Image (cartoon, helix red, strand yellow):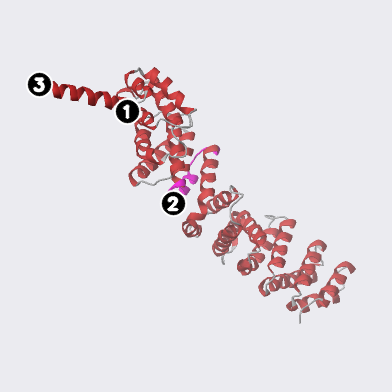
Amino acid sequence: MKKLYFTILFFLSTVFLFADFSQEQKAFVSSSIQDKVSILKKQIAMAEKDLPLLDMALDFCLTNASILSDSTHLHDLLFVSLYALPQDNLEPYDSALKKLFFLYNKEEIRVEILNLLTKIAISEAFFTENLYNFLFEEIEKDYSRRSNKSIFASLQYLSSIQDLAFFNKIYPLLSKNIDFELKKNIEEVLALSIENYKSDLLERISTTTAQEKKLILSILGRNPHLNLFFKAEVTENLLRATIISIGDNTGAERESLLKEFYEVQMESVRIIKEAKWTRAASLVAGYFPIAVEQYTAFLISKDELLEVMDSLTLLATSETGRALSDYLAVLNKKTEKTGLFDEEIMLHLISALAQLGEKTAFDNLLYVILHEGYPDSIISASKEALAKLNW
């Protein structure tokens, strides 16, 4: 009698247990992999997801990965499972997704997993370190074997978790011999998160080569929404580093440095001007004599030299005014010695001094008026500038 009682109790408990499962869940357990895929596909379009069914599917993919990892049917099941996951509640799947990433080496699967993990954006040290290793190994592969999609998805995930080591680990990749598309992808991802790594970026600026400084400017240019003042601070440091590098070098060494840095210096000045970054006014003033050298050496154009003058005028400090006044003195000496001058440069320079009302230019402007070699246009401009000096 007691035996019969336990038999009936077991039967009833089993009935109630299975009664808790939906028809789709029961069908999933007993079906082939192809049929499992069909069952899961219905979940993609459903607003109310059968979460236990999704758990079953992911668990099946995890359990059978080592046995059937090359099975196209299992790949299909995993794909459908990933697409069926509730996009507004992905966090509970974080652990399973991270395990699945390294169990399946199919590019499309890995990219989709990383896209989901990027939305979750939860950092976990073991997975992060292994993903860096995967990323570096992938980049070292021959172009024909490399998965740029996997690389880009990895970069996006690592950026999303704001890993502290991200910039210092990823930035050096730009110096490797990589194709244009990959380089562009790396720059774009760095540009989106670069403000989080300002201290790392500024620390590198002082030790980077001219080419690496160009890379930094390229990264800044990849993000049109980047804070302008952040860009100005970075370019202020770039300009300072290049001026220090040129220093008191002479001869061939100086010529080489002037050529190496002129692009970085001009772009830095443009950004400083755009931001009206007056903190860098003394630096731009310090760069101006170098810009004159670069113009004389045909490294920058006349228009670019005038651009630097405009920057000094806009920043409008006593230092920028003196830099322009000193240049007028240089041009006056050249005119006295050779009789040669550039009317456009002279007029632009005198106009700048007039706008600033720079009183230290008094003697240099007076010289222009008294010098017989200058035309009426330059003399008249100098008289107007004298009348506008601040005393």
Whether tag 1 and tag 2 are in contact, CB under 8 A, the answer is no
Tell me the residue at 39%/47% (across/down): 123
Asked if residue 185 shows in the view, the reply is: yes
Does residue 116 lie above or below 391 as drawn? above
- Report helix, strand or loop for mark 2: helix
Q: Nearer the viewer, residue 278 or 307?
A: 278
Q: In which quarter of the image is the N terminus?
A: top left
Compared with residue 382, is residue 163 higher up or lower down, i.e. above or below?
above
Sequence-wise first label, 1 or 2 = 1
Mark 2 belongs to which amino acid?
Asn
Residue at numbered disc 1: 20
Give the SS element for disc 1. Answer: loop
The percent position of residue 200, horizontal first and vertical second, equals: 46, 57
Quadrant in the rendering for residue 15: top left
Q: Give the range drawn in magenta.
A: 160-180
* Residue 221 x %, y %: 60, 49
Disc count in the image? 3
- Mark 1, mark 2: which one is toward the viewer? 1
Give the number of the disc on residue 1: 3
Residue 107 visible to an observer of this rendering: no
Please tell me whether mark 3 or mark 1 is closer to you in this view.
3
Q: Which percent across, then down, holds residue 268?
A: 62, 58
